[in-house]
Image: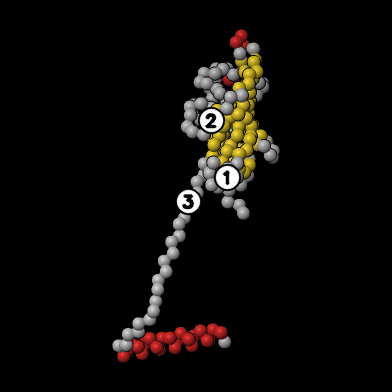
């Protein structure tokens, strides 16, 4: 019945319009146009990364292991040739050497984001055996630690399996450790070379 009423009304309206055109009649009705403006500004996603502390156990003068701690904050939010482990080009390491960076990832943007860490090994110029003896471990503030060998080049976490979520204006701490594992084949990698990137991804959190 309701659908039928709609059809009838449309038919009546159409008949009136045809009649007016046939007689050449003009109707002047009061009318007004109201314009509305919608202003949308796209939000931003901007992550900051600060190393709060670096603990190194590595070869010192005389070849003995030395433990050192650097408490000075260092900002890695912009492009830099430095790395979070403080390893300069040509730095020598030995089995059981370790570098632990305590990091704070901040959110200075408008959207919440999730973050994860990716290890990318340059397999073209790196020794694969040496890379298989280097382990990267990530310990988020909450949740279980994740680890991978540099040779595997895995992502520690992901978009759907993030290490953590940082709200707009917030921050979260996590730790990344690089270790030279004690292995029966350590002698085979003497004087070998490894290059890899540690990438920290921040991805907008869209879960509701």
Q: Which mark is residue 168?
A: 1
**Point 66% across, 34% down: residue:** 139
> Which quadrant of the structure image shows residue 53?
top right
**Point 39% across, 88% down: residue:** 16
Report the residue marked by disc 2.
75
The quarter in which the C terminus is drawn is bottom right
Asked whether the residues under the numbered discs 2 and 3 touch, taking CB atoms below 8 Å apart as contact, a structural biologist would say no
Whole-number angstrom distance, CA of label 1 to CA of label 2: 19 Å
**Point 47% across, 55% down: residue:** 40
- Vertical placement of residue 11 versus 38, above or below: below
Q: Which mark is residue 42?
A: 3
Residue 36 location (% of width, % of height): 44, 64
Q: How is the image coloured?
A: secondary structure
The residue lying toward the viewer, choosing from 202 and 187, is 202
Whole-number angstrom distance, CA of label 1 to CA of label 3: 15 Å
The residue lying toward the viewer, choosing from 57 and 128, is 57
């Amino acid at each position: 019945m309701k659908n039928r009423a709609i059809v009838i009304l449309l038919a009546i309206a159409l008949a009136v319009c045809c009649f007016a055109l046939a007689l050449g009649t003009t109707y002047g009705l009061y009318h007004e146009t109201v314009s509305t403006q919608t202003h949308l500004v796209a939000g931003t996603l901007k992550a900051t990364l600060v190393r709060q502390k670096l603990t190194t156990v590595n070869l010192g003068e005389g070849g003995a292991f030395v433990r050192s701690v650097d408490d000075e904050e260092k900002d890695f939010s912009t492009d830099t040739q430095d790395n979070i482990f403080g390893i300069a080009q040509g730095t020598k390491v030995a089995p059981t050497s370790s570098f632990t960076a305590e990091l704070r990832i901040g959110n200075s943007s408008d959207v919440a984001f999730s973050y994860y860490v990716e290890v990318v090994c340059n397999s073209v110029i790196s020794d694969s055996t040496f890379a298989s003896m280097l382990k990267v471990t990530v310990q988020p503030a909450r949740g279980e630690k994740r680890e991978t060998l540099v040779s595997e080049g895995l992502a520690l976490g992901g978009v759907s399996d993030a290490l953590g979520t940082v709200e707009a204006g917030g921050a979260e701490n996590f730790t990344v450790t690089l270790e030279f594992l004690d292995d029966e084949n350590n002698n085979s990698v003497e004087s070998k070379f490894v290059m890899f990137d540690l990438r920290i991804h921040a991805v907008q959190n869209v879960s509701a």
